[in-house]
Image (cartoon, rainbow, N blue to C red):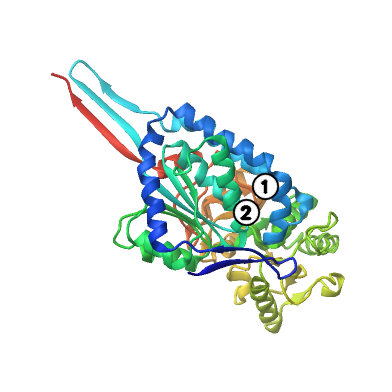
Amino acid sequence: MSTIKLISPVDGSVHAERAALPLADARACVARARAAQGNWAARPLRERVDLVMAGIDALEGMNAEIVQELAWQMGRPVRYGGEMGGVRERASYMAQIAADALADEVIEDSATLSRVLTRAPQGVVFVIAPWNYPFLTAVNTVVPALIAGNAVVLKHASQTLLAGERLAQAMHAAGVPHDVFQNLALDHATTEALIGERAFGFVNFTGSVGGGQAIEHAAAGTFTGLGLELGGKDPGYVREDADLDAAVEGLMDGAMFNSGQCCCGIERIYVHESLYDAFVAKAVAWVGGQKLGNPLEQDTTMGPMAHARFAATVRSQIAEALGAGARALIDPALFPADDGGAYLAPQILVDVDHSMRVMTEESFGPVVGIMPVKDDAQAVALMNDSPYGLTASIWTRDVDAARVIGAQIETGTILMNRCDYLDPALCWSGCKDTGRGAALSKLGYLALTRSKSYHLKKV
């Protein structure tokens, strides 16, 4: 029997350890979910909504403990108070639109025919959640999947094992049946075996491109529906008419918050040449005001990366860029907590170009490269010069210009004068190597259900 260990980035200790569920036991759990799903779907929609939202209430009631657990599990400073504000926003919106999103569409109801389009649950939905925002990313699928009448099996990342257990504890305390929502500790082999056996009606995965490829390979030939949110290299563009101070504050926070470990965090910035020098100077000052340290201390603004190997990837990108002519503007000595391991000083790089991995390969850490551009056309070309497409951020006072530029960018979401934000009323999706599928909004419900038509001829 394999063991899943959670190594805390705070001090390198084993913070939690769980035995991975053997394949036979995992199959039994999925069978129970499948057996329970029909009765769950038969409950009135209002009842399912109320039970799920009561689960969110219960989760919020645990937040004081969860904030501490997040610091130990993945290094986010306690000063930020966890994720419950976003969890509430997303869950509440999906609950609010459920009746309309799942409503039958009556095509005809005449003396001779009843023709109706309906939405049916996918059955058992498998959610493979990441560690960087372990509650926010999970609820994107868990909440609408349950509301739509699916049973849900959750496999959380090994780095945030306790988050999955908290979600299950909250949902069960609220009255969601244990077999309808299950949190399982699974290793990669068992996960892939279950998918390959067509154990699930739908699989949602948030993680790396390599992980998404493994999921697709496991599902090949099963015709299982997949939702894949994979890598990103999200750009920010500062036009010459931008509010400079707002752009610096927004983009640098987007680049450095959560130690840069955000799905839609800013990883590269393009600034109109007329504002470039001023932007860079202000960005350096902004980073200089941060404090890297123990995430359990209230004055820490940046904690360690979730694992030392993640930090090693960022260090290698920075070193390679410096060797190719880039300049580092942040003196690591300003951040004495940088220990060469999980604790990594933030960095700004200039004199960068797209021959460097730090500008083209996902970093997922506290580093950002900044380049000057002469006009919108050059900015668009550079923003599109990426294998990824999740979000792009445009900083301008001209809404019409943002729309024109946005139409040319290959990405899932265009943001103006903000970044690193997910609006639950809009579809969360990406293109290229960022993956495929749709989360949140009405389209999220369409992904978690299937169409079912009724053509009833009256005699």
Quadrant of residue 423 within the rendered picture: top right
196 is higher (above) or lower (below) than 104: below
The residue shown at (54%, 66%) is: 386
Quadrant of residue 287 within the rendered picture: bottom right
Q: Residue 434, how many percent across, how many down?
A: 50, 60
Q: What's under tag 1, amino acid-wise? A: Glu
Tag 2–tag 1 contact (CB < 8 Å) = yes
Q: CA distance from mark 2 to mark 1?
A: 8 Å
Using residue 286 as the reference point, say whether residue 15 is left or right of it: left
**Foreground residue, 47 or 28?**
28
Q: Residue 75, how many percent across, how many down?
A: 71, 61
- The mark nearer the N terminus, 2 or 1, is 1
Q: Residue 235, how many percent across, how many down?
A: 62, 60
Residue 133 disc label: 2
**Foreground residue, 459 or 182?**
182
**Foreground residue, 32 or 57?**
32
Under tag 2, what secondary structure? loop
Count residues near mark 1 (Cα–Cα under 10 Å), then give few for <14, some for 14-19, many for 20+.
Answer: some
If the image is split into quadrants, where does the C terminus sit?
Answer: top left
Please, which residue is most extreme toward the bottom here?
323
Q: Which residue is mark 1?
A: 83
144 is higher (above) or lower (below) than 458: below
Q: Residue 154, how many percent across, how many down?
A: 49, 52
Please, which residue is most extreme toward the top here?
111
Quadrant of residue 139 within the rendered picture: top right
The residue shown at (40%, 29%) is: 103
The residue shown at (63%, 36%) is: 57
Under tag 1, what secondary structure? loop
